[in-house]
Amino acid sequence: MVGEHVSLYAYSRGWAARDLPYQLWRMIEDANDWSQLIWEDDVKDTRVSKFGDLTHWMAFMEDKMWLLIVDNATQVICGLGWFSDRRGSTALSSIWMAPQWRGKPHSREAIKLGIEFGYQELNLTTIQSITPWPIARNLCVKCGYRVIAFIPKHFGHDVWFLEHTRNN
């Protein structure tokens, strides 16, 4: 999927760089964004935190369909989107953008291209998202998602459940 600012590429093991999962992990680690990405608490039962370590990251991403978000002008990876928890023609979607790309048109365009990918390539009819972050909720709404519910204290976080249907 190619847009004005970004392109999306589906990650496929054996077709991408061998260390691409590490490169993505390193980007998130350098941004110190683990608590933004993974909502579970950091259990401090070891000398060095296991929260967001490479093993935790790979286990977290293991069952997800990854979409690399690449800046068209520089060919630099600026983020990662993914689909998960697919049930029939419905799946959850998520996005993470590196800090230097936030607030630029890249995020909104990546979400819109991800929606298009979900409908065209995955044959989804409904794409859902869940977030505790008001800024992420607002971004999703600007991209055509509807707020379906506000859920207080979902795994310790107040969250918004959003949905985009093929007819939006």
Image (cartoon, rainbow, N blue to C red):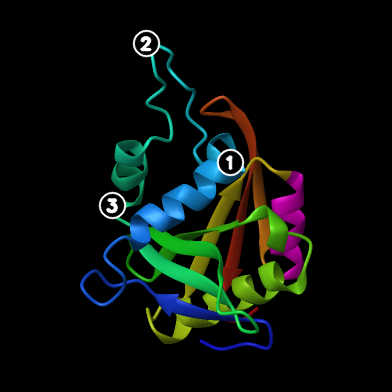
Residue 33, numbered label: 1
Please name which of the two marks, 2 or 3, marks the residue nearer to the observer: 2
Residue 32 pos. (x, y %): 58, 38
- Name the foreground residue: 166 vs 61: 61
**Who's the residue at 59% across and 68% down the image?**
164
Q: Earlier in the sequence, mark 1 or mark 3?
A: 1
Residue 98 pos. (x, y %): 62, 56
Magenta stretch encompasses residue 10: no
Q: Earlier in the sequence, mark 2 or mark 3?
A: 2
Amino acid type at mark 1: Asp
Q: Quadrant of residue 54?
A: top left
**Who's the residue at 42% across and 22% down the image?**
49
| Residues shaded magenta | 134-143
Magenta segment main secondary structure: helix
Relative vertical location of residue 91 with respect to residue 132 in this rendering, above or below: below
Classify mark 2: residues with Cα within 10 Å, few (<14), some (14-19) or many (20+).
Answer: few
- Name the foreground residue: 132 vs 1: 1
Q: Give the residue pinned by disc 2.
A: 45
Q: CA distance from mark 2 to mark 3?
A: 24 Å
Q: CA distance from mark 1 to mark 2?
A: 21 Å
